[in-house]
């Protein structure tokens, strides 16, 4: 089941995830934390007998603590992959539906960095939107000519629609000379 949920999450992330900027803490609370925590509680209640048996099987206190930690971590991961993915997919659909009701806006933002991929990150363009640092993932070939340039000479123009909770759905973007 874990493998199936992982594949569903990967497919959703690659093909259906909506790139947004802006927003506030409501996404973190209502779309990420609450579904993940509630899902973990539901799973824990459903598997209560197994969890109790597992915790009672350890005699050593340190082993019990380590066992509890990894069980909790597994519950949270399983919950995120199931309940969290469902909540995120629903959020994306509602956000796009709301965004389609609004007109297209063009927003010019100051670029702070052209990020070349390292072993743990993507190629990105970092910029400031409403005082917060945001990014868009890009292909290396697109930013290669800009890597040795001064970011102050360029801006990013975003084609967006306002969605829910002060989120803006990025439809397209372009790098322009200042």
Image: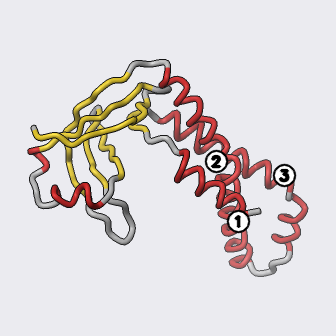
Q: Residue at x 25, y 40 (%)?
A: 174
C-alpha distance separating marks 3 and 1: 22 Å
Q: Which numbered dot is residue 85?
A: 2
Question: In front: 56, or 20?
Answer: 20
Q: Residue at x 9, y 52 (%)?
A: 150
**Residue receiving disc 3:** 45
Which badge, 3 or 1, comes first in the chain's sequence?
1
Residues tagged 2 and 1 counted as in contact (Cβ below 8 A): no
Colour scheme of this structure image? secondary structure
Query: Total of numbered circles in the picture?
Result: 3
**Residue 3: x percent and y percent?**
70, 65
Secondary structure category for the residue under label 2: helix
Is residue 167 toward the left or the right of residue 140 in the image?
A: right
- Rendered-image quadrant of the N terminus: bottom right
Disc 1 crowd rating (10 Å Cα; few below 14, some 14-19, many 20+) is: few
Secondary structure category for the residue under label 3: helix
Disc 3 crowd rating (10 Å Cα; few below 14, some 14-19, many 20+) is: few
C-alpha distance separating marks 2 and 3: 20 Å
Q: Residue at x 65, y 52 (%)?
A: 80
Is residue 137 toward the left or the right of residue 40 in the image?
A: left
Which badge, 2 or 3, comes first in the chain's sequence?
3
- Rendered-image quadrant of the C terminus: top left
Is residue 33 toward the left or the right of residue 56 in the image?
A: left
C-alpha distance separating marks 2 and 1: 14 Å
**Residue receiving disc 1:** 3
Query: Residue 65 is drawn in which quadrant?
Result: bottom right
Disc 2 crowd rating (10 Å Cα; few below 14, some 14-19, many 20+) is: many
Which badge, 2 or 1, comes first in the chain's sequence?
1
Relative vertical location of residue 35 with respect to residue 3 in this rendering, above or below: above
């Amino acid at each position: 089941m874990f493998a199936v949920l992982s594949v569903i999450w990967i497919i959703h992330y690659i093909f259906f995830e909506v790139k947004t900027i802006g927003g506030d803490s409501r996404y973190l609370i209502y779309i990420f934390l609450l579904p993940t925590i509630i899902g973990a509680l539901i799973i824990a209640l459903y598997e209560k007998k197994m969890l109790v048996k597992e915790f009672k099987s350890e005699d050593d206190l340190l082993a019990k603590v380590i066992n509890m930690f990894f069980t909790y971590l597994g519950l949270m991961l399983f919950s995120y992959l199931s309940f969290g993915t469902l909540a995120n997919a629903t959020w994306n659909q509602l956000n796009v539906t709301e965004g389609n009701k609004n007109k297209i806006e063009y927003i010019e933002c100051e670029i702070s960095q052209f990020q070349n991929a390292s072993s743990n990150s993507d190629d990105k363009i970092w910029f400031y939107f409403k005082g917060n640092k945001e990014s868009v993932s890009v292909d290396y070939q697109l930013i290669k000519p800009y890597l040795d340039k001064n970011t102050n000479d360029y801006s990013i123009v975003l084609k967006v629609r306002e969605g829910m909770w002060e989120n803006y759905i990025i439809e397209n973007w372009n790098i322009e000379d200042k």
